[in-house]
């Protein structure tokens, strides 16, 4: 017959074993982050191990254009995306009604004009075709760059999203061709120069530091952001994702990997 004393002793031993056993680590939170190929995807690969230490298991989902990552995020097929600057996100939210917000600034990719035919933008003959992106924010960014360097004049007060109809001065009568941003590198065979975003330039084997014949200064509103749905913005995993991205480890990776072609905001 088991005595009360033995039962008490067994309970004490069992409790001691429980205290001596380390707690099981919580399962990491799985999140899907949308990016475009090239630097954005490469940077997220560097973020992954840092985020895992904070309990986040990131799956990187690559998209070949600038439209679908916001469609997927708004639809709940992603938890976050990291590929766009604030003016582009603002335009998407306004035009499409997305319930998306930025939660942190990340990196800046100074835009450039590239050419296979000319070593200087000044050498491009009058009447030549110049390609810019066909979305309002990146196309507008290219036009602002041309104005900043003295090749175009835009209507006063156009803000950060001018279009070709806002061009009021074009001394060399350039023909402005609007194309999808992802197709910009392919246009180099057909135009005198093409405005190309850094991520697509590097993907095409171009050097964003040495190859542009015209390049914007690293200033203005075009710092990229991490975007999430409004309903998620205060969740703990968002803070962990931001801290992992804006970590010293990732900053060092960007400096070593891109050597000035990509600039950190922290």
Image (cartoon, rainbow, N blue to C red):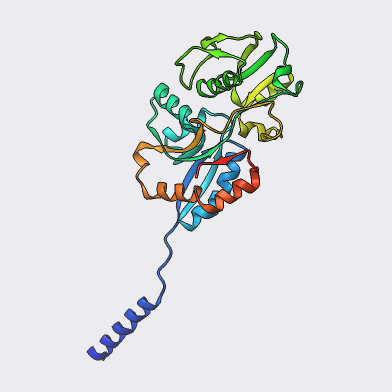
Identify the residue at horizontal 70%, vertical 18% (top origin). Answer: 122
Residue 91 shown left or right of residue 263 in the figure: left
Residue 13, given in percent of the width and then of the height, sits at 33, 84
Residue 37 shown left or right of residue 13 in the figure: right
Q: Residue furthest front?
A: 150
Residue 23, given in percent of the width and then of the height, sits at 40, 69
Q: How many marks?
A: 0
Q: Quadrant of residue 65?
A: top right
Q: Residue furthest left?
A: 4
Identify the residue at horizontal 71%, vertical 31% (top origin). Answer: 211
Residue 243 shown left or right of residue 18 in the figure: right
Q: Quadrant of residue 119?
A: top right
Residue 257 in sight:
yes
Pick the front one: 119 or 233: 119
| The N terminus lies in quadrant | bottom left
Residue 262, given in percent of the width and then of the height, sits at 60, 39
Residue 3 in sight:
no
Judge whether 225 appears above or below 244 on screen: above
Judge whether 259 appears above or below 69 on screen: below
Identify the residue at horizontal 64%, vertical 18% (top origin). Answer: 131
Identify the residue at horizontal 52%, vertical 15% (top origin). Answer: 163
Residue 227, given in percent of the width and then of the height, sits at 44, 37
């Amino acid at each position: 017959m088991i005595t009360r004393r033995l039962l008490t002793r067994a309970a004490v031993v069992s409790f001691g074993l429980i205290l001596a056993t380390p707690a099981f680590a919580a399962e990491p939170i799985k999140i899907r982050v949308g990016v475009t190929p090239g630097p954005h995807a490469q940077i997220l690969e560097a973020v992954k191990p840092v985020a895992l230490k904070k309990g986040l298991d990131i799956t990187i989902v690559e998209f070949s254009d600038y439209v679908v990552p916001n469609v997927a995020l708004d639809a709940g097929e992603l938890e976050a995306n990291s590929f766009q600057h604030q003016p582009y996100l603002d335009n998407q939210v306004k035009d499409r009604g997305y319930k998306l917000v930025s939660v942190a600034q990340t990196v800046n990719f100074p835009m450039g004009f590239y050419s296979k035919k000319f070593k200087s933008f000044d050498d491009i003959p009058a009447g030549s075709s110049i390609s810019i992106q066909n979305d309002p924010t990146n196309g507008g960014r290219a036009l602002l760059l041309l104005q900043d360097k003295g090749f175009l004049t835009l209507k006063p007060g156009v803000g950060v999203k001018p279009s070709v109809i806002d061009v009021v001065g074009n001394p060399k009568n350039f023909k402005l061709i609007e194309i999808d941003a992802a197709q910009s590198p392919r246009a180099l065979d057909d135009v005198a120069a093409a405005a190309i975003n850094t991520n697509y330039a590097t993907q095409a084997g171009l050097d964003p530091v040495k190859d542009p014949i015209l390049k914007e200064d690293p200033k203005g509103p075009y710092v990229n952001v991490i975007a999430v749905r409004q309903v998620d913005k205060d969740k703990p995993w968002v803070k962990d994702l931001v801290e992992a991205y804006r970590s010293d480890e990732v900053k060092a990776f960007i400096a070593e990997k891109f050597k000035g072609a990509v600039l950190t905001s922290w």
